[in-house]
Image: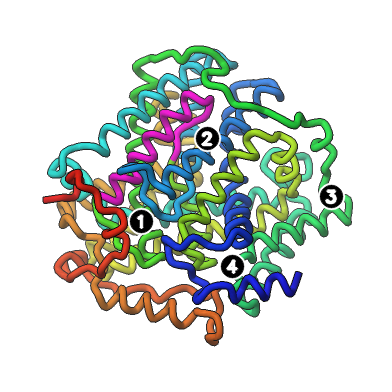
């Protein structure tokens, strides 16, 4: 194993792997599987929560999980590989958005629960997906005007909010999984702490290759230890079917009702902010220029995946912030790693036995790794905020007040459950919804509409990022765990006036059709 690791670690010129590099198959498999494991908990938790709330049977719940994984794989391949002018061609994993959980439960319970509720949800999901897809094809002037609502102070705040809101999810897993009989037991925290410590040690002292798969190794070693101690159970693997094929409209023909559709359209507005922020964040991490056309392609992939999710018995999709954190940690930038992860997702969606093996990872082990990942999501948001002049009081107020709004649902849940109409509560009882809305509104009040290219980093920042990549190449003193240097904080106006760094992708992705970003 050591010889294999050594051979792989010297297989390329740099451990960072440029975004358009196709890696050797062993590396693609390892890095793709690591993305899968980092994404898996977040992927399956939404169908589990929604299915449980709607009182679905165990068999129906398993079908939801398989359908979700299968569609996640297709959506991730579309986003990372790209089909024409659909997909950002960046290492972005597509997963079911957490923002939709409360609204979908509200819609489902209003429809009486069970599979009948799923039909109403799917009607809203399909409609919202088509609307999102259509929005991303708006004429250049209209699209650019809308995108000016999302300068770095907004997208950076939203990504930071996502990380902060997700950290409790990781901590709940570290405690044994919310609602489990052993929730809060010391052994769960022991597994979480041991897994986290193992990952941090690898990131600190490991060679670039070992550092890049630290999350994967942490999950494998943690699960192995739990199995030896009798706390990792693989009994469900034998009970699971070998094949589980997802078919369109498995639960019946969707129903289209106006209030669920309106609610889901609002959810998709929030997810567009998330995807926009994640696209800019991962562009900064991989050192690739992101313009309004790149964002439009990412949003088209979101819309197409969401509409497809409604057809294939799944839910709304968004670029997953968790895996943005993984890209930042490992500095493996190749988008084809995400394509490989998409293939693994499709396989898991077709093989319930394979999914059962991954599901056997104990909550404590998963929580230890997830907490590190979610913290890195918040850090990716802070890195985006590095483009903002936070010495300006108005920008500081936008960030600070938005974070305060984001913490309101978790801090004072009774305000939403006891003193608010159920429909309104289902919409507003979300830290991401409140934080993102506050950031957009406050930015409009204090700053107005941003410049068209407010996210462009100055050449000095791009040069600093390139130098940081050289410093972490194999043979250097730095490890792959060290973060690239954040571009110097500058006001959005200064960033907009600076010439952006040249993008290597422009020649490869040239399209004779005018893009929405064209003047």
Please report whichever mark, 4 or 2, sits nearer to the chain's N-terminal start: 2
Query: Mark 2 = which residue?
Result: 71
**Overall secondary structure of the magenta section:** helix
From the image, state whether disc 1 or disc 3 is nearer to you: 3
Residue 419 shows in this picture: no
Residue 211 covered by magenta stretch: no
Pointer 4: residues within 10 angstroms few (<14), some, or many (20+)?
many
Please report whichever mark, 3 or 2, sits nearer to the chain's N-terminal start: 2
Query: Mark 1 = which residue?
Result: 157
Please report whichever mark, 3 or 4, sits nearer to the chain's N-terminal start: 4
Determine whether the residue tagged by mark 4 lies in a helix, strand or loop: helix
Please report whichever mark, 1 or 2, sits nearer to the chain's N-terminal start: 2
* On screen, residue 162 above or below 301: below
From the image, state whether disc 3 or disc 2 is nearer to you: 2
Please report whichever mark, 1 or 3, sits nearer to the chain's N-terminal start: 1
Q: Which residues are magenta?
A: 293-317
From the image, state whether disc 1 or disc 2 is nearer to you: 2
Pointer 2: residues within 10 angstroms few (<14), some, or many (20+)?
many
Query: Could you say which quadrant of the image residue 432 lies in?
Result: top left
Residues under labels 3 and 4: Cα distance?
27 Å
Query: Mark 4 = which residue?
Result: 212
Query: Could you say which quadrant of the image residue 61 lies in?
Result: top right
Determine whether the residue tagged by mark 1 lies in a helix, strand or loop: helix
The percent coordinates of residue 34 (x first, y second) are 61, 56
Determine whether the residue tagged by mark 3 lies in a helix, strand or loop: loop
- Quadrant of the image containing the N terminus: bottom right
Q: How is the image coloured?
A: rainbow
Determine whether the residue tagged by mark 2 lies in a helix, strand or loop: helix
Query: Mark 3 = which residue?
Result: 231
- Residue at image coords 48%, 68%: 17
């Amino acid at each position: 194993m050591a010889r294999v690791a050594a051979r792989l670690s010297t297989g390329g010129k740099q451990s960072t792997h440029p975004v358009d590099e196709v890696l050797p198959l062993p590396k693609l498999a390892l890095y793709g599987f690591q993305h899968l494991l980092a994404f898996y908990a977040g992927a399956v938790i939404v169908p589990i929560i929604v299915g449980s709330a709607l009182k679905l049977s165990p068999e129906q719940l398993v079908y939801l999980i398989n359908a979700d994984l299968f569609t996640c794989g297709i959506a991730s391949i579309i986003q990372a590989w790209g089909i024409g002018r659909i997909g950002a061609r960046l290492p972005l994993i597509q997963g079911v958005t957490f923002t939709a959980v409360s609204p979908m439960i509200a819609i489902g319970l209003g429809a009486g629960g069970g599979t009948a509720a799923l039909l109403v949800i799917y009607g809203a999901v399909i409609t919202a997906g088509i609307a999102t897809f259509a929005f991303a094809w708006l004429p250049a002037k209209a699209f650019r005007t809308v995108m000016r609502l999302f300068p770095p102070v907004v997208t950076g705040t939203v990504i930071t909010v996502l990380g902060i809101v997700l950290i409790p999810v990781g901590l709940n897993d570290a405690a044994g999984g919310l609602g489990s009989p052993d929730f809060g037991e010391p052994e769960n925290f022991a597994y979480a702490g041991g897994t986290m410590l193992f990952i941090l040690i690898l990131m600190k002292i490991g060679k670039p290759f070992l550092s890049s798969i630290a999350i994967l190794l942490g999950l494998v070693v943690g699960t192995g230890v739990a199995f030896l101690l009798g706390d990792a159970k693989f009994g469900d693997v034998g009970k699971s079917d070998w094949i589980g094929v997802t078919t369109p409209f498995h639960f019946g023909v969707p129903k289209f009702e106006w209030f669920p559709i309106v609610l889901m359209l609002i959810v998709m507005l929030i997810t567009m902010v998330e995807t926009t922020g994640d696209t800019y964040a991962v562009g900064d991490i991989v050192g690739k220029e992101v313009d309004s056309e790149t964002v439009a392609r990412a949003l088209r992939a979101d819309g197409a995946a969401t509409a497809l999710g409604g057809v294939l018995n799944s839910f709304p999709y968004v670029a997953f912030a968790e895996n943005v954190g993984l890209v930042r940690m490992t500095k493996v930038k190749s988008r084809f790693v995400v394509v490989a992860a998409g293939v693994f997702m499709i396989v898991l969606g077709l093989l319930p036995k394979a999914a059962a093996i991954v599901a056997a990872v104990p909550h404590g082990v998963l929580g230890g790794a997830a907490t590190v990942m979610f913290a890195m999501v918040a850090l990716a948001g802070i890195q985006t905020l590095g483009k903002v002049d936070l010495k300006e009081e108005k920008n500081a107020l936008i960030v600070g007040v938005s974070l305060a709004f984001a913490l309101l649902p978790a801090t004072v849940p009774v305000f939403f459950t006891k003193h608010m109409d159920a429909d309104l509560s289902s919409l507003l009882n979300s830290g991401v919804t409140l934080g993102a809305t506050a950031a957009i509104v406050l930015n409009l009040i204090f700053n107005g509409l941003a410049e068209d290219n407010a996210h462009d980093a100055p050449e000095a920042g791009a040069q600093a990022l390139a130098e940081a990549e050289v410093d972490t190449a194999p043979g250097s003193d730095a490890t792959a765990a060290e973060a690239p240097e954040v571009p110097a904080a500058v006001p959005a106006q200064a960033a907009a006036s600076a010439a952006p760094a040249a993008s290597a992708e422009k020649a490869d992705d040239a399209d004779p059709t005018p893009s929405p970003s064209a003047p």
